[in-house]
């Protein structure tokens, strides 16, 4: 398996992969592929990596800038997608590690995401109860600071996510 930056010709394949990956996920709302498409169209993908093997796309991770209480330099991770037939084989973990490595190398302040604390805790993410995101339970708002304190306040993802600020 090889992880690399997405190519411009792969947008449709990434959309199809993302749709399949989230098709039966209980937490999915069916907009994950459109979120990636809108981020790409807006030029808001800070990191967009694919996992491939023998020319076949197996996974994708998207990262985009976020604002926390008026502070910049933070990024939101997601969606992260793995082909259903290859889930639980370490592809998502490899994509996560590669994305975090790129963000650290770019001297970002840190990363936030909405997800399962038990899973993302393995990467150093922790619950961030002082981050506010309307309609999202605080226990699934997670943060990973890169050597800086975590700001407090409203968490604003790119408008591509369709979320409203608190």
Image: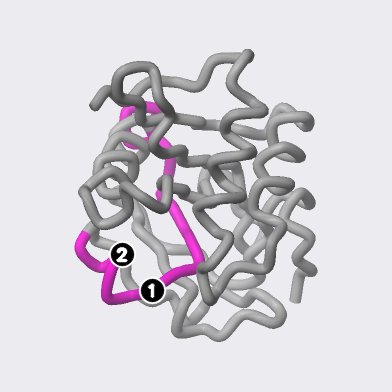
Label 2 belongs to which residue?
A: 120
Q: Are marks 1 and 2 in contact (CB under 8 Å)?
A: yes
Q: Nearer the viewer, residue 130 or 77?
A: 77
Q: Which residue is drawn at the image coordinates 79% and 69% (left, top)?
A: 164
Q: Which residue is drawn at the image coordinates 39% and 36% (left, top)?
A: 58
Residue 91 higher or lower than 132, as above or below: above
Question: Could you say where residue 7 lies in the image, as x and y percent from the top left?
Answer: 54, 15
57 sits left or right of 94 in the view: right
Label 1 belongs to which residue?
A: 116
Q: Nearer the viewer, residue 126 or 36?
A: 36
Residue 52 higher or lower than 149, as above or below: above
Q: Nearer the viewer, residue 145 or 42?
A: 42
Q: Nearer the viewer, residue 110 or 37?
A: 37
Q: Which residues are magenta?
A: 103-122
State the SS at label 1: loop
State the SS at label 2: helix
Residue 3 higher or lower than 117, as above or below: above
**Badge 1: residue crowd in 10 Å (few <14, some 14–19, many ≥20):** some
Viewport quadrant of the C terminus: bottom right
Question: Could you say where residue 154 lies in the image, as x and y percent from the top left?
Answer: 66, 70
Viewport quadrant of the N terminus: top left
């Amino acid at each position: 398996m090889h992880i690399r930056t997405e190519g411009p010709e792969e947008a449709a394949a990434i959309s199809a992969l993302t749709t399949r990956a989230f098709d039966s996920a209980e937490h999915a709302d069916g907009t994950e592929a459109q979120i990636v498409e809108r981020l790409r169209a807006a030029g808001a993908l800070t990191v967009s990596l694919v996992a491939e093997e023998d020319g076949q796309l197996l996974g994708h991770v998207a990262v985009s800038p976020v604002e926390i209480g008026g502070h910049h330099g933070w990024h939101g991770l997601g969606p992260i997608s793995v082909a259903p037939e290859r889930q639980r084989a370490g592809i998502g973990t490899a994509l996560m590690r590669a994305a975090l490595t790129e963000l650290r190398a770019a001297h970002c302040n840190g990363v936030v995401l909405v997800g399962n604390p038990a899973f993302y805790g393995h990467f150093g993410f922790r619950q961030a109860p002082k981050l506010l995101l309307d309609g999202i339970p605080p226990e699934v708002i997670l943060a990973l600071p890169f050597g800086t304190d975590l700001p407090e306040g409203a968490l604003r993802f790119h408008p591509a996510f369709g979320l409203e600020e608190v």
